[in-house]
Image (cartoon, rainbow, N blue to C red):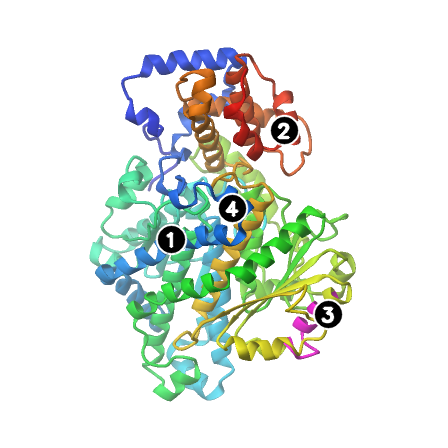
């Protein structure tokens, strides 16, 4: 059994790798900068730089800046539609990678066969991811698998033929999970993603057995909890059965989005990559549209591929018992050919680019709402899991207020998500496809105490376990209920966004539907309404429906964004849901950029709350400072200066974190990353120690984006 912690060689920055013989010069530079700042690296910083190297992920491809979006924030500030085209241009990397799977058909065929066998033999299918990929693992269960079986069970004659072959419990046999369980969808448990142990324990607690099929998804390819999960599956198999790689390859699968060569320096990754019994499915597309933000391209290709693998397995399994006519009633036409389904992604992307003008209007409206102090409320039914995932991720990713808990007064989060259910419990059922589930504390407390991992990480994980207690689910209510309307209902200046996915068209004109009531609530208050419609109908047919909506003005103040897709052969609505993900990913990035939370194609407002995000924050400081130091205007005024090092960046960052922790609640735009960048550059520009208080004054008065635009041209 493999245990935490894993030690690996210290990872170097690109500059350090390019000039490995400059150790003494680097030391001199470090002394110069830190002496100038009057700063001694804190014990936390020293520990991080030297002992937490497994979490320093800046060399990974997913953490790099994409050349297609290098100046994204400037472009979208000037021209919304041009900014959207930049984002969709990066999604073309997904299409390119999917096309290459034609040459790698065998690896996906193994996955299809594994799920088919599990369905037919009564085995479980366990899908485990972390953060973004964990949300989409739960989406696979709650938005695809469970709704499909619930729908099939309403068709009495068909279910009567299927039930004896697969059993009553089929709906419960796919489990989507993430570190910390359901509560981590909105409030991630600190420390849980950083431990291989937690992945192992959740595997055990969920009752996954040798012979069950396990899919682990890690966008970075190195997430400790995800790797711990696949190792636990491997260990349990080899304890029960003789080791045979060929048999293991029918059970264990690992999705990753970084190439092998950048992951090999990590010991935990190297063991995984070299294990022949684990099938590796490389979904590398390259850098993300926003550096390190794997909610975009990485999780999109992972979700798209695994969803179509699942759909192909369902098709093959059910055709054993059902006729072609019966399959057609379930939405399956001709037998699913996985290679053909993968080739449909470019069609989704082309359809998305066609609605850029209307999507840009929706973004402009959301931006204005935020700037004017208003709120944006989303309502979705078929797309509830998709909308929820993207909105929940915005808080930690862009350092905005997280989704409000019950009773938050006054409202703090500028975004809220509602699902068309009358109460809290049913709302969770819509999002998850099942009741909300908590981690049983009694199981984890004893086993975490016995862990051999980093003591600090174990302590953090143990403390955060209390956040998964049963009453935590009561803190979040996403229902479209009378109570929520009274306390969080629309006010003048708010924006309502309705996400409609075929076959939900009739709900728009049904005066008794939740959709109609949602629109009525906003329109009665004079608020603007936007409808994002992913449909199988033509624009003309949808426009007829829209014009029947009372008080909705698609030619005036209200917004209608229609994306049409062919529904043929898409019984799980995968393409429609992925289309909504792509559009809402882009919309989220656009709004955040227009409100100053994206600089270039980086997100320097991120909150360094865990080991991975501290590494991301350190690399952001490094990148932005060194970009300025090599600009011709800076060199002309201040001379050639050597790039700052990773250690220097981290020392200044931890000092900024300490400063912000000691100053209570901060405005959303305050960021330890931005504070560090300004402090370093001003100290170098003025050749004196620049205080954190001075840096904070510049940040609040000028903002990081304008500061970075102007600093290179300023003299001492």
Q: Nearer the viewer, residue 650 or 376?
A: 376
2 or 4: mark nearer the eye: 2
Give the residue at mark 3. 520
Q: Earlier in the sequence, mark 2 or mark 3?
A: 3
Image quadrant in which the N terminus is located? top left
Q: Earlier in the sequence, mark 2 or mark 4?
A: 4
Q: Which mark is residue 216?
A: 1
Residue 556 visible in the displayed image: yes
Element at label 3? helix
Circle 4 Cα neighbour tier, 10 Å, few/some/many (<14 / 14–19 / ≥20): some
Give the residue at mark 2. 661
Element at label 1? strand
2 or 1: mark nearer the eye: 2
Magenta part, dominant SS: helix
Alpha carbon of mark 2 to alpha carbon of mark 4: how far?
30 Å
Alpha carbon of mark 3 to alpha carbon of mark 4: how far?
47 Å
Alpha carbon of mark 2 to alpha carbon of mark 3: how far?
44 Å
Element at label 4? helix
Alpha carbon of mark 3 to alpha carbon of mark 1: how far?
43 Å
């Amino acid at each position: 059994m493999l245990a935490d912690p894993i030690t690996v060689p210290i990872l170097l920055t690109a500059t350090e790798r390019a000039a490995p013989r400059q150790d003494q010069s680097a030391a001199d530079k470090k002394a110069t900068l830190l002496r100038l700042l009057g700063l001694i690296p804190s014990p936390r910083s020293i520990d991080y730089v030297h002992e937490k190297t497994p979490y320093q992920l800046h060399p990974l491809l997913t953490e790099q800046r994409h050349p297609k979006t290098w100046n994204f924030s400037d472009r979208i500030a000037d021209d919304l539609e041009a900014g959207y085209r930049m984002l969709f241009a990066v999604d073309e990397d997904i299409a390119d990678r999917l096309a290459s799977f034609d040459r790698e058909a065998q690896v996906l065929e193994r996955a299809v066969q594994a799920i088919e066998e599990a369905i037919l033999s009564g085995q479980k299918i366990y899908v485990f991811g972390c953060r973004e990929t964990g949300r989409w693992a739960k989406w696979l269960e709650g938005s695809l698998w469970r709704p499909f079986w619930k729908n099939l069970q309403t068709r009495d004659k068909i279910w009567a033929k299927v039930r004896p072959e697969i059993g009553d419990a089929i709906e419960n046999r796919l489990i989507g999970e993430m570190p910390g369980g359901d509560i981590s969808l909105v409030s991630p448990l600190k420390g849980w993603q950083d431990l291989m142990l937690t992945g192992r324990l959740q595997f055990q607690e969920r009752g996954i057995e040798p012979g069950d099929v396990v899919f682990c998804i890690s966008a970075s390819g190195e997430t400790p909890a995800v790797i711990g999960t696949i190792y636990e599956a491997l260990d349990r198999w080899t304890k029960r059965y003789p080791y045979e790689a060929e048999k293991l390859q029918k059970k264990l699968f690992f999705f990753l989005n970084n190439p092998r060569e950048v992951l090999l320096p990590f010991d935990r990754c190297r063991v995984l990559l070299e294990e022949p019994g684990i099938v590796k499915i490389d979904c590398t597309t390259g850098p993300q549209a926003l550096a390190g933000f794997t909610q975009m391209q990485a999780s999109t290709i992972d979700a798209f591929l695994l969803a179509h693998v699942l759909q192909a397995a369902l098709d093959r399994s059910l055709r054993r018992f059902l006729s072609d006519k019966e399959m057609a009633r379930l939405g399956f036409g001709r037998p699913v050919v996985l290679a053909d389904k993968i080739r449909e992604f470019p069609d989704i992307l082309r359809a998305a680019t066609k609605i850029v003008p209307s999507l840009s209007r929706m973004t402009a409206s959301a931006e204005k709402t935020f700037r004017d102090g208003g709120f944006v409320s989303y309502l979705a039914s078929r797309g509830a899991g998709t909308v929820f995932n993207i909105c929940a991720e915005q808080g930690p990713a862009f350092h905005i207020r997280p989704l409000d808990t019950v009773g938050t007064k006054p409202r703090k989060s500028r975004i809220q998500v509602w699902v068309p259910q009358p109460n809290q419990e049913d709302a969770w059922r819509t999002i998850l496809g099942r009741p909300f589930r908590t981690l049983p504390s009694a199981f984890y407390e004893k086993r975490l105490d016995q862990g051999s991992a980093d003591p600090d990480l174990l302590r953090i994980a143990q403390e955060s376990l209390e956040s998964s207690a049963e009453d935590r689910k009561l803190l979040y209510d996403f229902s479209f209920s009378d109570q929520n309307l009274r306390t969080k209902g629309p006010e003048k200046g708010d924006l309502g966004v309705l996400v409609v996915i075929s076959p939900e068209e009739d709900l728009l004109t049904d005066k008794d539907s939740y959709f109609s009531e949602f629109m009525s609530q906003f329109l009665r208050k004079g608020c603007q309404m936007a409808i994002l419609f992913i449909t199988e109908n033509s624009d003309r047919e949808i426009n007829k429906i829209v014009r029947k909506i009372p008080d909705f003005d698609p030619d005036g103040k209200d917004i209608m964004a229609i994306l049409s897709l062919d529904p043929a052969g898409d019984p799980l609505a995968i393409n429609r849901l992925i289309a909504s993900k792509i559009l809402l990913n882009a919309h989220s990035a656009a709004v955040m950029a227009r409100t100053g939370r994206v600089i270039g194609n980086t997100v320097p407002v991120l909150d360094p709350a865990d080991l991975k995000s501290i590494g991301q924050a350190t690399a952001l400081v490094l990148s932005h400072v060194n970009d300025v130091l090599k600009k011709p205007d800076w060199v002309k005024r201040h001379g050639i200066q050597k790039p700052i090092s990773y250690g220097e960046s981290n020392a200044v960052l931890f000092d900024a974190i300490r400063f912000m922790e000691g100053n209570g609640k901060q405005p959303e735009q305050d960021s330890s990353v931005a504070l560090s960048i300004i402090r370093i550059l001003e100290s170098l520009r003025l050749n004196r120690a620049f205080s954190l208080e001075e840096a904070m004054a510049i940040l609040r008065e000028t903002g990081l984006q304008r500061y970075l635009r102007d600093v290179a041209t300023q003299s001492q």
